[in-house]
């Protein structure tokens, strides 16, 4: 999930993105479901302890 702007939950959009091949010591996993925790909800609303440095952000 990529975040292109801060705001209400509707600003979140699911997007297909290219990921590179796994490097040494890495694996690729398939994600069937995602959920947001409190920190991610605060980030999306612009209230997280770390400010957004650039968009899009994951």
Image: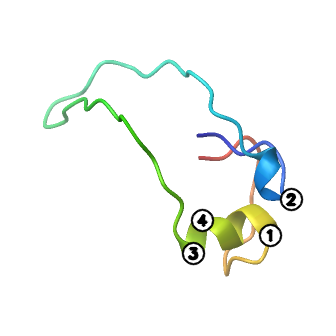
Verify CB contact (< 8 Å) between mark 3 and mark 4.
yes
Check residue 7 in the rendering and tell me which mark sits there, or answer none.
2
* Of callouts 4 and 2, the N-terminal one: 2
- Which residue has dot 1 on it? 46
Labels 1 & 2 near each other (Cβ < 8 A): yes
For the N terminus, which image quadrant? Answer: top right
Give the numbered dot on residue 38.
Answer: 3
Residue shown at the point (74%, 57%) measured from the top left: 53
Is the residue marked by circle 3 packed among few (<14), some (14-19), or many (20+) residues within 10 Å? few
Q: Mark 4 points at which residue?
A: 40
Where is 44 relative to 50, above or below? above
Given this view, does label 1 or label 2 mark the residue nearer the observer? 2
Q: Which residue is drawn at 45% across and 47% down?
A: 34
Q: What residue is at 52 percent from the left and 68 percent from the top? A: 37
Q: Earlier in the sequence, mark 1 or mark 2?
A: 2
Please give the label number shown on residue 57: none
Residue 11 at what x, y percent from top left?
81, 46
**CA gap, disc 3 and disc 2:** 15 Å
Residue 48 image-quadrant placement: bottom right
Q: Position of residue 18 (x, y in %)?
A: 50, 18
Residue 49 appears left or right of 26: right
Numbered disc 2: secondary structure: loop
**Dot 3: element:** helix
Residue drawn at (16%, 30%) of the image: 24
In 3D space, how far apart are the residues under numbered discs 3 and 4 (Cα atoms)?
Answer: 5 Å
Secondary structure of residue under mark 4: helix
The residues tagged by marks 1 and 2 sit, at their Cα atoms, a distance apart of 7 Å
């Amino acid at each position: 999930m990529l975040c292109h702007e801060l705001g209400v939950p509707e600003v979140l959009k699911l997007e297909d993105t290219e990921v590179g091949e796994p490097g040494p010591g890495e694996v690729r996993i398939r994600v069937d479901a995602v959920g947001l925790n409190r920190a991610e909800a605060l980030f999306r609303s612009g209230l997280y302890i770390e400010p957004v440095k650039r968009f899009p952000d994951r």
